[in-house]
Image (cartoon, rainbow, N blue to C red):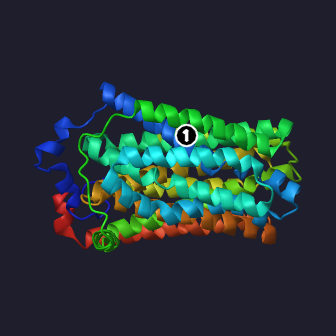
Amino acid sequence: MSPASTGASTVVGAELSEPSAASSPDSRMAPGGAGYRRMSLALFLAGVATFALLYSTQALLPLISGEFGVTASDASWTVAAATGGLALFVLPMSALSERYGRRTVMTGSLAVAVTVGLLVPFAPSIGWLVVLRGLQGAALAGLPASATAYLAEEVRPKALVTAIGLFVAGNSVGGMSGRVITGWVAQEWGWRVAVGVIGAVAVACAVAFRLLLPAPRHFTPGSLRPRVLLGTVRGHLADPLLRRLYAIGALFMTVFGGVYTVIGYRLTEAPFSLPQGIVGSIFLVYLVGTVSASTAGRLVGRLGRRGALYLAGGTTAAGLLLSLADSLPLVLVGLVLITAGFFAGHAVASSAVSRTATTGRAQASALYQSAYYVGSSAGSTAGALAFHAGGWSGTVGVGVLAVLGVVAITVLGSRAARRQPVVAAAH
């Protein structure tokens, strides 16, 4: 079996040898071309807008808790509602993208999300804030699955991991810039102005995205019939490899959601007692995620997908354990390792989903994104509850359990691959 195999069925090989002239690899975008550069920048900006909006309140939770007089677990719902809304609506949105086109759905999603984002600063209560954030997450649901499906259709297969890595890198830049900007703006003018600024940045990204993204050339409209959609979903859920990849995405995001929901509380409390602006700047470590996501393709080439997942999980676990120290430099190193491991693992798993599914790619990606953001919501809530019950060590405990789950699932994939020598030989 080749190093890059993860026990996938032979559909991966089928994808690389589709005979249709309309979808010939030679006619798809490749690195170095003008269309590829425009596409990469457009989806990078879409990723920036998505994560900046989705997690715009995460670095501000201590301020939100203070204004509304609620606990960390209550304030964490402003994050969990957004990611939960995305998880709930990503599959229906992917169905719309199969019928009306990837670019159309992505543009509409961003338009609605940025509009809601401009309303968030005016939320009169924690309840209304949670509702608006849920609506914002639901609107953003049309973007992640449609983006990966667009890439799978429009980019040459050998460049797919790199292209998806660039989109994920945009996620990391959005998450970083959103938190850094909100931290410093909130320190001077409060959290409401901070989320308003993020809304304005997202508007600019949305406009640039629509102007830059090339029109699709390989999209074929599908059906909106529920029976067809359910059949496609059942087919994807019946694939053991896809099920494993969905679980891996959810578990990686459980770690990430829990850590970054709670870290602001930890760093503003003793023994660190950092001001809000400095806490926001901690999220500059997201730059590490930008690098690890964009180099995921090379990592898979050297270690194979399973090897890359083991490395990502081990790096994340090492970061969690380092973050237990009451030393700010060690905590920062821990966050760097957690971030690098998470983004690498996410890029590897999400690209494997896109390569495995040869039909209903939007639904395959939507199921991954749904699991991924369920993991985010679960991590935000479980991490905050664990922090309330046992401090930072409780949050780390939740993360370590999730990483062990990633390792266990990857081991199961290895064993499944060894039981299928014929499939392995095909790779």
Number of marks in the image? 1
Location of residue 382 (image quadrant): bottom right
Q: Nearer the viewer, residue 132 or 233?
A: 132
Say which quadrant the C terminus sits in.
bottom left
The residue that label 1 is drawn on is: 48
Residue at image position (11%, 43%) is 21
Residue 175 placement (x, y as % from top left):
61, 44
Left/right of residue 204 with respect to residue 427 in the rendered view: right
Residue 202 placement (x, y as % from top left):
59, 38
Location of residue 133 (image quadrant): bottom right
Q: Nearer the viewer, residue 110 or 26?
A: 110
Which amino acid does the dot numbered 1 rest on?
Val
Label 1: which secondary element: helix
Does the image show residue 84?
yes
Image height check: is 58 above or below 212?
Answer: below
Image height check: is 424 above or below 57?
Answer: below
Residue at image position (46%, 53%) is 142
Residue 345 placement (x, y as % from top left):
47, 53
Left/right of residue 204 with respect to residue 361 in the rendered view: right
Image height check: is 177 above or below 253?
Answer: above
For disc 1, the neighbor class at 10 Å (few under 14, some 14 to 19, many from 20) is many
Q: Nearer the viewer, residue 185 or 120?
A: 120
Say which quadrant the N terminus sits in.
bottom left
Residue at image position (58%, 37%) is 203
Does the image show residue 282?
no
